[in-house]
Amino acid sequence: MKYSRQRELVAEDVWCRCDHPTAAMVYDHVRKKSKDISLATVYRNLNQLVDEGKVEKLSMPDGADRYDGNIHEHQHVVCECCGAVLDVILGADFEEKLAAEILVKTGARVKSCRLMCVGTCERCACRKNKGKEAYATDE
C-alpha cells in the first residue's frame, strides 16, 4: 500500500493508546497534528489498518466501534457504567479449556478466541461502594 502521512498519524494514534478509541476520538486527536484530515479519512484509514491486521476493530454492543492497537491475542472487559474497555490476558490454559468445552458441546473446533465481558471497572465499583457507604452513614 502506498505511503500516507495521514494513515501513519492514525496508526500511531491507535498504537500509542490504551483506551481503545472510537474513530471520533482518533479524529479529535489526529486533527491537532493535521488540520486537513477529515473524519471520513480517519474511518477509511482505520478500516485499511484493520484489513492489514495492524489494528483490531472491536464491535461494541451498545455504541461506536472501538479500535485496539494491541493485535496480540487477548480479551476485553467493557465497563457498563463508564464504557471503558480494558485488556485482559486470560492465558493459553483458559483458551484451551474453552476450546475443549466448545468442541465437546458443539463439535466445532475453535481457531481463535475473542471474548468480550461486560461488567463494572474498579473505578466505577469504588464510586458505587463509596456512595453506599455515604448513604449508610446518613441513617
Image: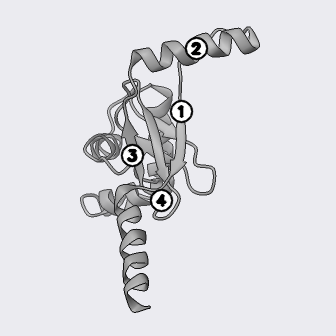
Q: Position of residue 124 (x, y in %)?
A: 40, 64
Say what amino acid the circle numbered 2 marks: Ala
Q: Position of residue 70 (x, y in %)?
A: 34, 33
Q: CA distance from mark 2 to mark 3?
A: 23 Å
- In the rendered image, the quadrant that contains the C terminus is bottom left
Callout 1 crowding tier (Cα within 10 Å): few <14, some 14–19, many ≥20: few
Q: Quadrant of residue 52?
A: top left
Q: Earlier in the sequence, mark 4 or mark 2?
A: 4
Numbered badge on residue 25: none
Residue at 35%, 61% (x, y): give it.
Answer: 36
Which residue is the site of mark 1? 115
User: Is residue 110 visible from the viewing direction of this image?
Assistant: no
Which residue is the site of mark 3? 86
Q: CA distance from mark 1 to mark 4?
A: 16 Å
Q: Secondary structure at mark 2?
A: helix
Callout 3 crowding tier (Cα within 10 Å): few <14, some 14–19, many ≥20: some
Report the side of 114 relative to 84 (left or right): right
Which residue is the site of mark 4? 83
Q: Position of residue 98 (x, y in %)?
A: 56, 18
Report the side of 15 relative to 43 (left or right): left
| 133 is higher (above) or lower (below) than 44 | below
Q: CA distance from mark 2 to mark 1?
A: 12 Å
Say what amino acid the circle numbered 3 marks: Leu
Which residue is the site of mark 2? 99
Q: Position of residue 120 (x, y in %)?
A: 47, 56
- Mark 2 or mark 3: which is in front? 2
Q: Earlier in the sequence, mark 2 or mark 1?
A: 2
Q: Earlier in the sequence, mark 1 or mark 4?
A: 4
Residue at 37%, 30% (x, y): give it.
Answer: 89
